[in-house]
């Protein structure tokens, strides 16, 4: 199944963070970790419409790594993979 976002929305696959440890060597459990804020764009919508009905181009493309707002978007799970559907306004930067 493939997600095709509408309007100015983007589908992002969040990057898994590596196992985190405290300076003393204790492993931090997944429930105590913060949500990742960097992910890979897997699908991009056609763009928003302006007042005249023209499509505005999107700033990101499939394959870009992006930084997004901490509590933004809607989580979706398809075929065992978690995705995040975000508005383009929730994207903060492209990570090189």
Image (cartoon, grey):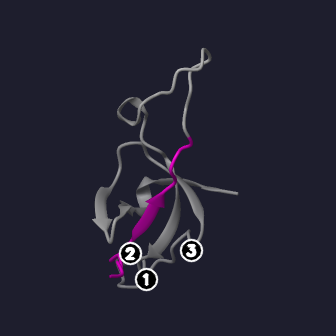
Of badges 2 and 3, nearer the viewer stands: 3
Residue beneath disc 3: 61
Q: Give coordinates of residue 17: x percent, y percent.
A: 53, 44
Quadrant, the C terminus: bottom right
What crowding class fits label 3: few (fewer than 14 Cα within 10 Å), some (14-19), or many (20 or more)?
some
Q: Give coordinates of residue 5: x percent, y percent.
A: 35, 76
Of badges 3 and 1, nearer the viewer stands: 3
Residue closer to the observer: 45 or 25: 25
Q: Judge whether residue 93 is colored magenta.
A: no
Q: What mark, if any, has residue 48 been given in the picture? A: 2
Q: What secondary structure characterizes most of the magenta part?
A: loop
Q: Which of the 4 quarters of the picture holds residue 71? A: top left
Q: Give coordinates of residue 40: x percent, y percent.
A: 53, 63
Residue closer to the observer: 90 or 15: 15
Q: Judge whether residue 5 is colored magenta.
A: yes
Q: CA distance from mark 2 to mark 3?
A: 15 Å
Q: Which of the 4 quarters of the picture holds residue 90? A: bottom left
What crowding class fits label 1: few (fewer than 14 Cα within 10 Å), some (14-19), or many (20 or more)?
some
Residue that sits furthest to the top in the current view: 24
> Which comes sooner in the sequence, label 2 or label 3?
2
> Start and end of the magenta stretch?
1-18
**Is the residue under label 3 in contact with that under label 2 (CB below 8 Å)?**
no
Is the residue 21 above or below the residue 23 in the image?
A: below
Residue beneath disc 1: 55
């Amino acid at each position: 199944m493939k997600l095709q976002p509408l309007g100015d929305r983007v589908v992002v696959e969040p990057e898994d963070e590596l196992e985190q440890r405290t300076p003393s060597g204790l492993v931090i459990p997944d429930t105590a970790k913060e949500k990742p804020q960097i992910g890979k764009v897997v699908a991009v919508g056609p763009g928003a419409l302006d007042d005249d009905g023209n499509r505005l181009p999107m700033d990101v493309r499939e394959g870009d790594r992006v930084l997004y707002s901490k509590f933004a978007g809607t989580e979706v799970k398809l075929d065992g993979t978690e995705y995040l559907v975000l508005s383009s306004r929730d994207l903060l930067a492209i990570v090189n």
